Amino acid sequence: MKSAPCKPVANLVGINREMRRITHKTIKKVTEDISTRFNFNTAVSAIMELVNALYQFKEVPESDRDPAALKEAVDSLLLLLSPFAPHITEEIWEATGHEGSIHQQRWPSYDPEAIVEDEITIVIQINSKVRDRMLVPAGLTAVEIQERIMKEPKILKLTEGKKIVKIIPVPDKLVNIVVKG
């Protein structure tokens, strides 16, 4: 299949933006798994994660859901699933109002801007034991994350009266605080 250009969905926020991010992340993963690595089991796993995200999206009040984000996710899901389940995806494609065979459609392409995360979860460890998690804006430097963590009341309480030997940041993943005493 040829790759179809992605259709941007303007000004999405919150759950709609997250649904679009998951959709495009899945398109990227499945495309790479099929065309480059030939890892079909992980491609199917990524598709299942998209299905789970759609179930969660369905639980959001209808007034908060953007129909364009939902349509993009469902259409992408069907196109990504079509090599694995050709007959049922053909039937669903037609039932959702599309004309022409699903197998004659362009393969979806992902939008690199859509898969960028705005916030990430940083794990906070003290002496290599997980003590907390913190949501921070993506792209913060190790020093900025360190400053935020050292202001957290829970971390202050856990390090109170102890000597901080060193702080080991792992960018966009975790911070380990080594203490003595």
Image (tube, rainbow, N blue to C red):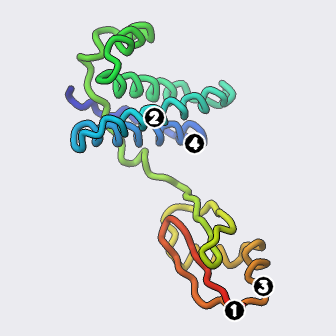
Looking at the rendered image, the disc whose residue lies closer to the viewer, 2 or 3, is 3
Mark-to-mark CA distance, 1 and 2: 51 Å
Q: Nearer the viewer, residue 176 or 96?
A: 176
Tag 2: amino acid: Val
Which of the 4 quarters of the picture holds residue 33? top left
Who comes first in sequence, dot 1 or dot 2?
2
**Considering the numbered disc 2 on the image, is that residue within a helix, a strand or a loop?**
loop
Structural crowding at the residue carrying mark 3, measured as other residues with C-alpha within 10 Å and reported as few (<14), some (14–19) or many (≥20): few
Q: Kindly check if marks 2 and 4 are in contact, taking CB atoms under 8 A apart as contact.
A: no
Question: Quadrant where the C terminus lies?
Answer: bottom right
Drawn side of residue 106 relative to residue 89, left or right: left
The residue positioned 55% from the left and 58% from the top of the image is 120
Drawn side of residue 106 relative to residue 53, left or right: left
- What label sits on residue 9 in the rendered view? 2
Q: Which residue is mark 1?
A: 163
Tag 3: amino acid: Glu
Tag 1: amino acid: Lys
59 relative to 22, above or below: above
Q: Kindly check if marks 4 and 3 are in contact, taking CB atoms under 8 A apart as contact.
A: no
Spot occupied by residue 144 in the image (x, y as percentages of width and height): 57, 76
Q: Which residue is mark 3?
A: 160
Tag 4: amino acid: Val
